[in-house]
Each structure stands twice: as C-alpha cells, then as structure tokens.
Amino acid sequence: MRPDDPFDDAVTARAVIAADGTLARWSEGARLLLGHRAEEVVGRPAADLLADGAGPPRLPAARWSGTLALRRRDGTTVTVWVLAHRRQPADDGPGEWLAVTPLEATDHELPDDPLVRTAVFQSPCAAMVFDAGLRLRGVNDAMAHLLGLPANHLRGLRPTDIGGRPQHTELERQLRQVLRTGRPTEMQTYMKATGESRAHAWLARLAPLTDQAGKVRGVCVTAHDFTEQYRARERLQLVNEASMHIGTTLDVTRTAQELVEVCVPALADFVSVDLLEPEEPGGEPVGPLTTPVALRRVAHQSLMPGSPESVAEVGEVVVYPAAAPQADSLMAGHSIVASVHSGDLDPWLAVDEARARQVREYGVHSMLSVPLQARGITLGVAAFTRFSRPEAFTHDDVLLAEDVTARAAVCIDNARRYSRERETTLTLQRSLLPRTLPRTAAVEAATRYLPAARSGVGGDWFDVIPLSGMRVAMVVGDVVGHGIQASATMGRLRTAVRTLADIDLAPDELLTHLDDLVLHLSQEATGENGPGEVGATCLYAVYDPVSRRCTLSRAGHPSPVLIPPGGPARHLDLPSGPPLGLGGLPFESAELELPDDAVLAFYTDGLVESRGRDTEAGHALLREALSPADGPLDETCDRVLHTVLTPGGATDDVALLLARTHGLPATQVATWDIPADPALVAPVRKQVVDQLATWALTEASFTAELVVSELVTNAIRYGAPPIRLRLIHDASTLICEVSDTSHTAPHLRRAKTWDEGGRGLLLVAQLTQRWGSRHTADGKTIWSELALGDEM
C-alpha cells in the first residue's frame, strides 16, 4: 500500500461511486467485507450490491451516513454502517462519492489501547487519536458531536473518509507531517457543530504521541472553540483595513466606494451608501429631515458580480418611506437593526414590491442601517444587508459598523469640503486666466490648462499680450503651492506682468521688477502669520514680427521647446535665472531669430513631472508629441496632453501655451530717416501719403498725415537726432512710429488758451486707437495705432 494512496487500506472497506451511479473503484477492504473482486463490480450499478427489497439511499448534497443491508458474493446478507460523502472533482467534470465502512475487526482492540485511555478519554475537550497509519483509533463524545457522526462507527477511518472538504485533506496532510517530524502543529477551520445554525471558529492542535522508547506511535488532535477571539480579531482587522483604505482620496464617490469594499464580505453580503442632496452644489445637507427622504446612491458592493440584488443604480435618487430602515435610522439619528423573521421589514416591503421581490429571491434576512454623521451634520446613510451569511447582526456587529461608518463619514465630509473649496478655487482661477487669447498678426496661439487631479488647484498661468509695433509678449508662470492663496497670488502676478508689459520693459528687466513684487508678497504673508514665503517661476518672451527675432528670459522656469517648420522639436538653451522671490540676483535674456511658422511651446513643470517617471523621460515624450507641429495648434495641444500625462491625471497643475510665429513681409514696412529740420515736415507728410497710396490705404491718409505731422514735429522740437519714422500695417491696423535718441518720454497735458504747444499729443490720442511710448537702448519711440477698414 502506498502511503499517499490510502484507498487499498485493508482495514476499511472503500468504494467510489461515479456520478451515474456505477462503481468506479473497489478496495481490498471492500473485497474482504463482501467477497466481490474489483473486476467483478467496477462499472456495474452500485445499487446491485443492495440486498433484495432495499432501495438506494437518497443522497444529500455533501454527506450521508446510515445502515445498509448489502449482498455478499456468496448470496448472504450483511448489515453495515456506511458513511458516504461527495468528493471535490479534480477538474470541471462531474463529482463522485466515496463510501466507507470500517471493518469490525478493529473494534475489539480499542478498549485496551493505552493511547485511547490516556489521550482521548482523559481529554476535557473535543479530541480524537490517529495511529501511525492515519486511522482513527479513538474519539470522545465531544468530537463525535462536532463531526456529527456516531463515535462507535468512526474507528478505523481516515480524515478523508470522514469528509471531502478541503479541511479534511489539510488535516490528513498535517497529521502526516507530525508523524514524520515529531513536532506539534496547529490548524484553523470554520465549521458548524451538529444542531447549531451558526458556524464556529475552531483551533485544532495536533500533538505527537510517543511510546516509552520515544517513537511516534500516533497523533492526538484536540479542537478548541475560539470563535470569540476569532471574531474579535476579524473586527480589529476590519477597523485596521478601514483606517488604511477609506479616505485615500478627496473624492466623495471614491470614499463611499472604499467603505462598501471594506465591509463586503467582512461585515455584510451587500452594502450601499446613499447621501443627502445639498440644496446648492457644493453646499451641505440641511435639516430638519422629513419622510419620505430622498437620497442619492453613490456606491454599493455585493458578494455577487454586478450587484444583482440592488434595486437602485449608482447615481440614481432613491426615495425611502418612513417604514424603511434607512429613513428610520436617519430620523432617529442612530443605528437600526431590522430582520425579516421579526417582521420589522414588513411595512416597508408591503409598499415596495421591487424590494420585496429581491428579498424573496435572494433570501435577505436582516438589515443594519447606520447614519453617516460628521461635525454634527447628517450626510446620509449606510445600509448593511445579509443573505448569504446565515447569522443575524449582533450587538458587536452594530458597534463595528458604527466605528467603520464614522471613519468614512469624516472622510466623506472632508472630501465634500475639499470639493467645495476646490470648486471655489477653480472658479477664481478661471476668472483670473484669460478667457480668450487676443488675435494678433505676429502669432497664432492655443492653450490648455488642467488643474491637478489630487493635490488641488495651483497657481499656474499663461498669457498672450499684444505690444506696440505689432510685437507680442508670451508668458507662462507657476506659483508654488495650491489652493485659493496660490490662485490669488497668481492673479496678482499676472496683473503685474500685464502692467509691466504695457510699459515695454525688456524681458530680463520685467522679471527683475516681478522678483521684487514676489519678495514683497512674501514679506506681507509673513507679517500676516500666513504661510510665509511666496515662490514662483516665470518665463517671458517677446516676438517682433518685423525683425522675426524673439527675446526670452526665464526665472527658474522650464525652457520652452522650439519646433521649426518640418524639423524636430528641441529645447532652447536659455540662461536659467533664479526663481522669483529670492531677491538681488540678476536675470539674463537670450535672443534668436525664428523662421515663419515656427512653433514655440511654453509649459509648466506639471506637464513633464510625475511620480514613477524620470523628468527627462517626460521631456522626451513632450518633444515626441510636438514633432511635427504643422497641424492645427488645438490638435497639437490635445496630442501633447494625451501623450505626456500619465493615466489618472496630472499630479500638479498643467499650463500649456503653443504659439506659431508669422513674420511681417518687408513690403508692409516703410522706414525714413528724418532730418532735424521743421521745414522738412511737409515733404515727409507727402512721402507718407504716397506710401499709403501704394498700400491702397488712401482712406487712412488724412488721419495718418495728421498723426505723422504731430509726432515728427514733436520729435524735431523736443527730441534728439537721429530721428526715424516707420510705418507698419497689416489687414486691420496701421502703426506710426517715430524714434529719437532722447530718453525723455512725452506725456499728455491740458493746454491753456494762449499756449502755443501742448495740443499735439492730445490730438494724436483723439485720432488713434491707442498710442504710447517705449524706451529703447538708443532712446525712445513714440507710437500710435490707427484702425483700418470697418474699424476706422
């Protein structure tokens, strides 16, 4: 006999009955009992072995035991006790039954067996003894009661003869290990004792039994009911899981889903979370509550895939009448336990046929409803339902559900408050960012802004600012931190950049002034017991379509990416510059010439930085997504976000600005050097009129002639030579610029009645769309813009 195959053990009669009722295997013990050889009975119906007039027993789902009259080979009849149990199939095939009968030859040995006397009958708990052949040599009444079988019929059986469950196979494996090693061991199982409706947790201790020579002769198995300790450990584990897995995000729906996932199946077979609807988006539920009460289902979880027992879908509004446990617990402000057996659910089910049908179909027997409360506010209700687990909810279950639900309620309340603050910050952020970008002849632009998925709205911003001379400024920045404070700081910095851009400061000089502002904001924040330091990064660029040159300067910000027409994307090598707010450190500018239809990509670091990915890998993905960028810029923006951002959204705010440059043809620019002689103003006016006729802009000649006359005369009278006049035009605008080497800027003043001067700039301001002056390295330039066409 092989030790790993006990089927041919001669002291026990064994037979395997296939699903079709025929005999599949026949042991040597069965031959000794009935006389039939295996080749004579295998393949025949097992019912043929029953004595005349005896019908086959009706087999239950798992195990059967009883007395049967069997026919021997010689025609005589023997009555034996038979234990049959279903064995788990090795694959998806049909199951089979193992029928065993211990031979009577072993019974007379047991009363004098010293192992039985010392280990079984003196044991105060459920106990049984197996010998070295893994045969059951003795069992006390406590263990027989636990197994649900008569003690006098169990002797001689192996664990796998007693039952076909996995714990029987595991017990046999552990017994073999104790016999081999001589060391005790333990195993746990969960089962119901005979006559009990509730399963218990059992701890089985397996101890070797040795003779005087120290040789292992058998194994004593004692079973201890540790249900209370087991359930206390389960409750502790559930509380621990709740603290670890509930509230991992600041999302209300996800937090509710985490609650139901933790509680199924540890506490209930089906759990749902319904929340009260606030009167206004982002607000808090208000009282007093009245029935029927309307709740929105935000999460549910079931033992069964798809939650078929749920009457409502996630997102639906559910109305609970006063008789429902959910409404009852909300009105009472405490937990409510209801069961079908007690009739507590009858009033509710009488008015809700759909739920009554589900209760009958799935065998729902008890419910526990716990209100979700935080900061004295009722947020909703969590309902726990049992149908697969036969036990009703106990007092300990209620305490456990209340503990877990209270944790979840705090997390849901935090998520709601965060969502409200996030929505407020987003509203502020959107109001501070440009709603639309200005349309300019110099650049075609497209932008994207994405708030952080988890860390909250930050202070990223972008802007496109038209400057004089058809130039355009492009800026992108990032304020350190998140929340309303960061958004408010962003708004102040964006306003400051626009103000500084209006006076046409060079990029490095503009960043110097912005650095002073951030330093001042930090001092203010420290004085107000705020977060203290305020930090930011910024990149500022100015593109001139006439010269096709772009001047850039950055303050701790990522370098932009340049995509030349038909070429690969590359990062520009710019002087880094310190972040804003350090104070006292210089900023440098870089200048480069851009071909027509080149694309510049400005962005914040949230686009390329993410957890689990190197920043350089993010930059590589960005360059890959931008090459080429010859299509519509909006499509390029979408492609960049789809390629570079990791699944689950950005971990930080993302601002992206793409600008395609368009140079102005030389034919749209005219330049004259003006002698410092007032007598030559008239010929200059004539040249301007002729040039406008060449450009087919004669309708603007009168206004342009007056503006040029005033600006040139002003430069000759108050400026310093050399003096230069430049006209620039596109489809909608005519620009007149007069430059000289004087650094004194003109300003409007109200001329008195008898003053000879002071009216020129006032006239220019009245005749043009806008006008101004900008300082240059050689002096200053006075400029004015005239609207053409329908805008005149």
Image (cartoon, grey):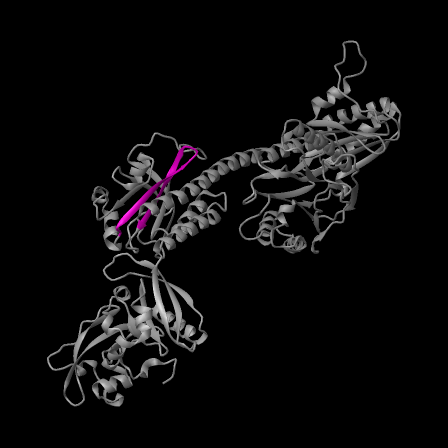
Q: Position of residue 225 (x, y in %)?
A: 33, 58
Q: Is residue 528 above or below residue 475?
A: above
In this rendering, position of residue 425 left or right of residue 136: right
Q: Among all residues in the image, which is located at the extreme top?
A: 754
Residue 37's place in the image compared with 642, above or below, is: below
Quadrant location of the N terminus in the rendered image: bottom left
Location of residue 322 in the rendering, given as x and y in whole percent from the top left corner: 26, 37
The segment highlighted magenta reads 364-385
Q: Does residue 277 appear in the picture of this structure?
A: no
Residue 713 sits in which quadrant? top right
Is most of the magenta stretch helix, strand or loop? Answer: strand
Is residue 767 left or right of 387 when viewed as pictured? Answer: right
Which image quarter holds the C terminus?
A: top right
Q: Which sits in the foreground, 321 or 201?
A: 201
| View extreme (front): residue | 212
One can see residue 703 in this view: yes
In depth, the one of 449 and 441 nearer the eye is: 449
Residue 563: x %, y % from top left: 70, 51
Q: Nearer the viewer, residue 415 or 36?
A: 36
Q: Is-magenta flag for residue 375?
A: yes
In this rendering, the count of numbered labels is 0
Q: Indicate the quadrant where residue 711 lies.
A: top right
Q: In the rendered structure, does residue 507 fall within the stretch colored magenta?
A: no
Residue drawn 43% across and 73% down? 177
Give the x, y percent position of residue 540.
72, 39
Above or below: residue 779 compared with residue 482: above
- The foreground one among 738 and 555 is 555
Question: Is 47 on the left or on the right of 28, as rendered?
Answer: left
